Amino acid sequence: MAIDLNLKFPSVLPPQRLLFTPGSEDFWHSLPSQPGIYIFEDRNKKPLYIGKSINLKTRLKQHYEGFTEGTTKALQFIPKTKFVYFKPVRNDIEAVITEANYIKSYQPRYNSIVKDDRSNLYIIFTNHPDTKIRIVHATDIANLNLDNFQKQVYGPYTSGTVSQSLYKQIRTIFGFCLTPFNGRNRACFNYHLGHCPGACTGEITVQKYHRHLGRIKKFLSGQFTLLDKSLHREIKTAITKTDFEKAQLIKIQIAGLHHSLSTHNSSLLLKLSDATDALQFQIVQKLKHPKLKKPPFRIECYDLAHLQGENYVGSMSVFIKGSPSTPDYRHFHIRFPDRSDPFAMRQIIERRLKHKEWGSPNLIVLDGGIPQLSIVTPVIPKDIPIIALAKKKEIIYFYNEDHKTVSVNLSLEDPVLNLFRNIRDEAHRFANSFHKKQRQKDLIS
């Protein structure tokens, strides 16, 4: 049986530490324009602030501009910064894992994720022997009475989107059991999907299963090279013992690991790391919306989905401080007689505004153009700014104080436009997924 072992990680630049000299052009030329982790350090090289970005050079410039303009928390750590350490990475998954482990290890003073840890999420491994992998809030960890915090807790992650993405990655690459060693040999849901090594059905011993979980812990610790070497040793041993079935399973894990770390396209996870305090101020400055006087803390976006008028549904996506707040997302069934997009959108927003317990948006974004804007605007409270984002041309529309239409054309690379596109894409994704579920229900019925 032939096993291909020639899978290779894509190469990245080595980590580097530079003297922080923002007044020098040489300093900025030395920074790479690629994804990575960056650390602002004091004179003793102690981390002050840790972050990740889709473009290291651009992100560090944003921090410095925020400092010079006095608009961001960079005011606190830039004056104390003597060095900048940066580590280029392959993609967003590696960036998320590396950033979380750095923050967990160094507890930098100026990271808000450290100051207010209550709402952050972690991936945890419960105690031996029936170890389960779960996503929990920081406030719930203490109730689990874990044996070893350092070896059982991975994070912190700032949103459900990030933690769920990592959870799905480890399930796809390695697989894990949802009900290990349950005493009845009852197969778990992951087993039926082919993502469980058989801890629920008695096909693997406790010792072997915990060695298997060790691979997942290496992945979440960012020890990718060590994990890769370990898997290659295991596959060679299996081939030597002519255990080709085991060798094939390990080969699949190696291929999954390399695929995860070789995808160059950075997804929503990494793009959102650039949605900073400075960007919130840029929204105000670039739009010059008459009702938008301060940075929008909560942005809501609305979209619709249907197939020739059937299974008509709507969605609301929510970004808080520039990051998705998935627990606040909402679905809507479109009720008769509103069966055109502008009136359907008005309907769901009218229904949303009745829910005072959901909080109040600081900015509403409509997926559409002037028709949606004109129909929806009359039902929006006068103190809430509203804009429409048209697809394809990506033009932003809103009304000025004289109720005349204003159009804003931002470049496709503009971070403000990218933030609006991200929240629009989230609303679109959420609406489509709900629409598909409704169609499936109709087909079954």
Image (tube, helix red, strand yellow):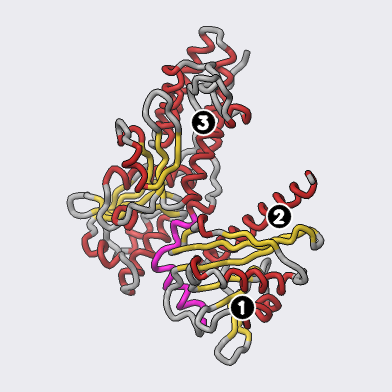
Please name the amino acid that badge 1 sits on.
Tyr
Number of marks in picture:
3
Label located before the other in sequence (3 or 1): 3
Where does residue 255 sit, x and y in percent of width and height? 56, 29
Q: Residue shown at 66%/52% (left/top)?
A: 433
Position of residue 267 in the picture relative to residue 226 (left or right): right
Where does residue 345 sit, x and y in percent of width and height? 67, 70
Find numbered disc 2 in the image and state the secondary structure of the residue it sits on: helix
Q: Is residue 272 above or below residue 256?
A: below
The question of residue 273 being in magenta is answered with yes
Please name the amino acid that badge 3 sits on.
Leu
Q: Which numbered marker is on residue 178?
A: 3
Q: Is residue 317 above or below residue 294?
A: above
Residue reaching furthest left? 44
Mark 1–mark 2 CB contact (< 8 Å): no
Please name the amino acid that badge 2 sits on.
His
Q: Which numbered marker is on residue 435?
A: 2
Q: Would you name the residue on which mark 1 appears?
A: 397
**10 Å neighbourhood of mark 2: few (<14), some, or many (≥20)?**
many
